[in-house]
Image: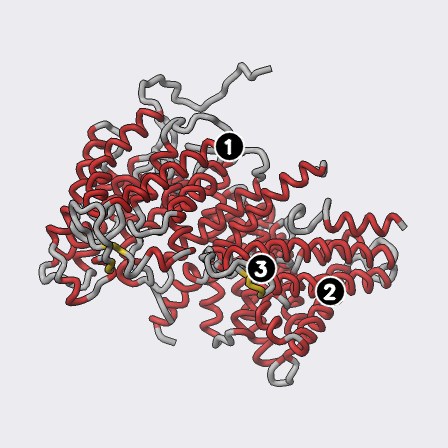
Amino acid sequence: MGFEEIMAIIFIYIFVENLVLNQFLGICPFVGVSRKMETAIGMSMAVLFVMTVAILVTWLIYNYLLEPFNLQFLEIVSFILVIASLVQLVEIMMRKISPALYQGLGIFLPLITTNCAIMGAALLAVTQEGFPFLTSIVFAIASAVGFAIALILMAAIRERMELVDLPRGISNSVVTMVTAGLLSLAFMGFEGVVTL
Amino acid sequence: MENKLVITPSPHIRTPETTKAIMMDVLIALFPVVVVAVLLFGYQALVTMVVAVLAAMITEAVVLRKKDLISDGSAAVTGLLLAMTLPATVPWWMPAIGSVVAIILGKQMFGGLGNNAFNPALVGRAVLVVSWATHMAGDVWPVPKPFSPFADVVTAATPLEKEGAELLEVPLMDMFLGNIGGSLGETSALALLIGGFWLFFRGHIDWRVPGCFFATVFLMGAIFGGGIYENLVLTGVFHLLAGGVMIGALFMATDMVTSPVTGLGKVIFGVGCGLITMIIRLWGNYPEGVMFAILLMNAVTPIIDRFTVPRKFGEVKE
Amino acid sequence: MSAYIQDIRRGILDENPVFRLLLGLCPVLGVTGFAMNGLGMGLAATMVLICSNVVISIFRNFIPKTIRVPIFIVVIASFVTMVDMLLAAFQPELHDQLGVFVPLIVVNCMILGRAEAFASKKPIARSFTDGLGIGLGFTVALVALAAFREILGHGTVFDIDITGAAFDPMGVMALPPGAFLALGILLYGVNLLFRKLGIE
């Protein structure tokens, strides 16, 4: 796969087809974890790690196990179990290897299981687009970075809004949604800058 | 009982520079551009501007439940700036809707002036561009007919939307004075520069944001601009004069609420705006990138502020 | 009897998964471009929710505590797979429109949340009505948002043109930014409405 293609995929899945702002995946953590910068960064790193490994494993399972034996209908069950177990594994490993890291990131890991970002990205890359192996890995990293960027931008804005007296009826979620909408609007400018 | 203990962050300084005074200065700065717009594009320009400003002021008054239409003047400025980004031929309800969106979604929803994350006028424009693209791009830009306020409108594309040989036909001097197609506020670089100098002279804008914005646009235009004119420098100048760079850099990117506070931050902001503008112009689907560039940099501003905080006296670097 | 009615009312109003609990937002934003899609997704999710709630409730005394979450997940995933296949077979256009969000029902936090908080502890009939209530609440929210976006963005609702040629649709509502903005606007409306109704 050419260098240009790799660069194109990276750009596209970070800016043009951003996981959160464009494809609506990972909204729950996007809304829930973006109140403080530390949690945003922590979640981003956790997602980056889990996303890459999950897509790697699900790719293998789909292409070497499900497809050859015509078991595609098992994709939903198998993918979600893989992701759930992966997260458990990461949690256990993290607790042993770096308790400090676990203190910071630990609580996010269960949140990653029941969030559409990983599952959605895996389904997208492996079954919908059917990317080849390396492309899937690049896609995973790019998508996670895109997620991180959206999350961190949102956290920075929300932290600034912490001290503001909001008008009546405007709850935090309203502000978050509108801000996300404006971010999504701004990102639309990148349309067509890079094409595959 | 009214809260008698008012807690505000420092600095606790008193200054005659009120919001209203600043807004008045901005309106004065825009005056040359308004005049040029009406001269070039006739009565329709006036209608667009009046509708936008009125809609903005009325919306703010309704939302804040105040009888005072003028208030601190910021709504009027938002309305006028929004109008400046629209073509004169735009149907009257567009500046109205744009102003409503700008004031509500771009400003008041965040808690009013000073708390908004994005430039309100550009929020309004972005929604308009995305919603009614057919009215905002392509062959809708009226060909200016100087000094003929009621002339029939003939429409064509802007210089940025033209390519190749057609492009060479647009003389740079026309672009400087304003005798070209475009939105109300983007045609006359001369009028905008006059306004910009007024704001600078009054101390309301810092040279860094527009300076770096211009420099980046010029450099990228010269180097990557595809050599529109044989002379690289002229290509760079073209990109400076074309589209919304002039008005964006002088009036939108300099909005103190949505741009960084620190000096280094302002430099980064200006460079970032220029960079993204040119990336979109040269390689993206949209012909003009200023609006998106500024909105994106608005979003990054809190992060820029965080990372460019100067070291406090006595602080030990970790 | 009233407990069952309460369950349903709770799911639609007080504990509306979208407007109050802000759960399962991905499909809320992703499929609400058209009212029909919103309705389809809502009903599909409701089906899964009711089925999984009932099954989990039936076996609630036999599921070991330590591995209950993976078991819940398998149950939910199986029903999602079934619904996915049923949709693909009987409603192919809807299935295509909803795309990846049908399988994503499996990670919809409201379903797993309900299994954990309710179905694993309450009798079957209650689990059924709870699932029905939450599912209806979800569907109502989806249809409301989708109708809002479709009317403004296309001038139609449920594919019926209700505005005529004079209305120039507001393109942004049909696009991703519009989804976020529309949800924000609706949330504001719901906040005001609930305050009027006295729910807090």
Question: Is B101 situated left or right of C133 in this image?
Answer: left
Residue at 43% of width from left, 34% of height from top?
B58
Whether residue B14 can be seen here: yes
Whether residue B296 can be seen here: no
The residue at which mark 2 appears reads as C48
Name the quadrant of the C terminus of chain B: top left
**The disc labelled 3 sits on which kind of residue?**
Thr
Provide the secondary structure element on which disc 3 rests.
loop
Q: Is residue A36 above or below residue B71?
A: below
Question: Is A20 situated left or right of B126 in this image?
Answer: right
* Upstream in sequence: badge 2 or badge 3: 3
Provide the secondary structure element on which disc 2 rests.
helix
Residue at 32% of width from left, 44% of height from top?
B48
Please rate how many residues cluster around mark 3, counting C-alpha atoms within 10 Å: few if below 14, some from 14 to 19, many from 20. many
Q: Position of residue A71 (x, y in %)?
A: 66, 81
- Give residue A142's mark: none
Distance between the Cα atoms at labels 1 and 2? 41 Å
The residue at which mark 1 appears reads as A164
Question: Is C76 situated left or right of B211 in this image?
Answer: right
Q: Given this view, does label 3 or label 1 mark the residue nearer the observer?
A: 3
Viewer-proximal residue among A53 and B38? B38
Distance between the Cα atoms at labels 2 and 3? 19 Å
